[in-house]
Amino acid sequence: MISTSVTTLYTALLALMFCALSLRVVLLRSRLKASFGDADDARLRRATRAHGNFAEYVPLALMLLLMLELAGRHSMWLHAAGSLLLVSRAAHAFGLSQVREWLGWRIAGVAGTFTVISGAAVALLLGLTGPH
């Protein structure tokens, strides 16, 4: 039986990050008394997009990581991809959340996320999934 312990680790860590991003939106909504929309508040708008962007990209990246793990890819590569994804999503959320945007953080986050997704996809397509 093939272990999925690497994907499990990064799924759990990213789930905690998702909860933190969600809680930030909930608290801002509560403070602003905005049950829907962004109350024309830049902080809430940015927090909502950081949360949404995370929800848009992370599931696909984790699915690809799982496919690589199930195919028997060496755990070193899986940890490298999982770590890059974790750091990238934190950087992106931080950069996007700033009212005075820190574009460098967003760019680094996007680049890292796309590297994980595209690298995993290419590895799967090329069949480079055996133990290395």
Image: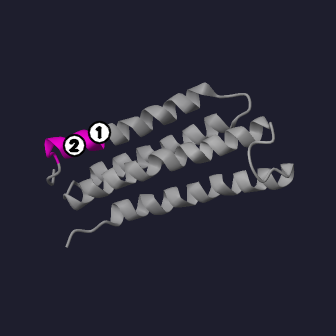
Separation (CA) of disc 2 from disc 1: 6 Å
Residue under the point 65% across and 55% down: 22
Question: Which type of secondary structure does the marked residue at label 1 adopt?
Answer: helix
Tell me, yes or no, whether the two marked residues, 2 and 1, touch with CB atoms within 8 Å: yes
Residue 86: give x, y in percent of width and height: 48, 48
Residue under the point 81% across and 42% down: 39
Question: Residue 49, relative to residue 69: is it above or below?
Answer: above
Residue 123: mark in rendering: 2
Q: Residues within 10 Å of mark 1 (few under 14, many from 20)?
A: some
Residue 84: give x, y in percent of width and height: 42, 43
Question: Residue 22, relative to residue 81: is it above or below?
Answer: below
Question: Which type of secondary structure does the marked residue at label 2 adopt?
Answer: helix
Quick check: is 53 in the magenta stretch?
A: no
Q: Quadrant of residue 94?
A: top right
Which span of residues is magenta-colored? 120-128
Residue under the point 57% across and 32% down: 105
Q: Quadrant of residue 115?
A: top left
Q: Amino acid at mark 1?
A: Gly
Residue 119: mark in rendering: 1
User: Does residue 49 appear to the left or right of 57 in the view shown?
Assistant: right
Q: Amino acid at mark 2?
A: Ala
User: Does residue 88 appear to the left or right of 8 in the view shown?
Assistant: right
**Nearest the camera: 40 or 46?**
40
